Amino acid sequence: MARVDKKNAGLMNLIKRMHGVVENVDIEKHRQSQDHLGALLGNSKEVIVEDLEIAVRGEDDRTIHGEWIYVNRAHMKKYVILYCHGGGYSTGSSLYARTLTTKLAASTSMDVLCFDYRLAPENPYPAAVQDAMQVWDYLMLLGYGARDVILAGDSAGGNLALSLCLQLKAQGRLMPRGLVLMSPWTDLTASGKSHVVKAEIDPVLNASYLEQMIENYALGQDLTDPLISPLFGDYEGFPPTYIQVGSNEILQDDAVMLYKKLLKVNVSVKMDVFKGMWHVFQMSPFKTAYEAMDKNAEFIYDICR
């Protein structure tokens, strides 16, 4: 047992070194580091990446960049995964997210669309939420029905996926077939005990980083607004949801509290807490990450039957 713990401690130290970019106050360098990581770790012969530009309705000159990830083999085209990348709403991109989207496409044999929403502090709330809705509408215009779409995201992308779904519900529109959330950041008020209890062991996130991200994205806003902190939303009638979280992350309770809230209103929800894992560990190129992706695929297959 001690050997496993020692091995895990070594992995955690490696992750801490890799994610040292979160200590970087230069946001532009942080973004470049993440893109570099995505290009390095998101390389897969199993998939084809195709760039696209989505025209924003009502704005002549603005487009939202995105990319399709296709598996390089015959596969079913009926369903599509719409992916919201993480990065605290201030960093991240579809390139950075390739560490996840390529695995997701390979494990599900489904097409994945990831998009670059506008980032804070240049574009604070509600820019990202507006962009997510534009991309949703784009998919509907392509001919997909809401029930053909699985909405997925990690960290702030999990927040964005939930916010998009809450918006669709508020507008009386059909919601996606299901939600897949990896280490979702659901509560910008940081009310969960794990923010304190896990502070010493989380190798990726810390309180000062989250505070900076919140200031960038939602300065002067009501942090209990469900489109900012989806934990405070109304989940009655929500689609089936699957949540993955690591036991060594300060956002563990963000996932756990959401899980309990969904259960309370009879949403079909499942959550796996991965022992010894960190924030969005699925990015890393090792066995547990691939096992977690297989679990995501199993959930998606179940709801698509």
Image (spheres, rainbow, N blue to C red):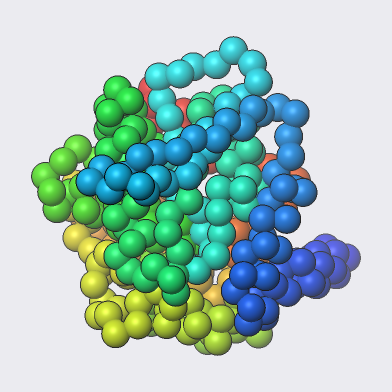
The extreme left residue here reads 172
The extreme front residue here reads 61
The quarter in which the C terminus is drawn is top left
The reply to whether residue 84 is visible in this rendering is yes
Q: Image height check: is 277 above or below 244?
A: below
Which percent across, then down, holds residue 220? 29, 85
Residue at 73% over, 74% down: 20
Name the residue nearer the viewer: 64 or 21. Answer: 64
Q: Quadrant of residue 263?
A: bottom left
Name the residue nearer the viewer: 300 or 48. Answer: 48
The extreme top residue here reads 74
146 on left or right of 271: left
Residue at 58% over, 37% down: 104
The reply to whether residue 152 is visible in this rendering is no
Residue at 43% over, 30% down: 80
Counting labels gives: 0
The quarter in which the N terminus is drawn is bottom right
Which percent across, then down, holds residue 92? 56, 59
Residue at 49% over, 17% down: 76
Q: Image height check: is 298 above or below 41?
A: above
Q: Image height check: is 7 above or below 172?
A: below
Which percent across, then down, holds residue 44? 73, 34
Which percent across, then down, holds residue 270? 42, 49
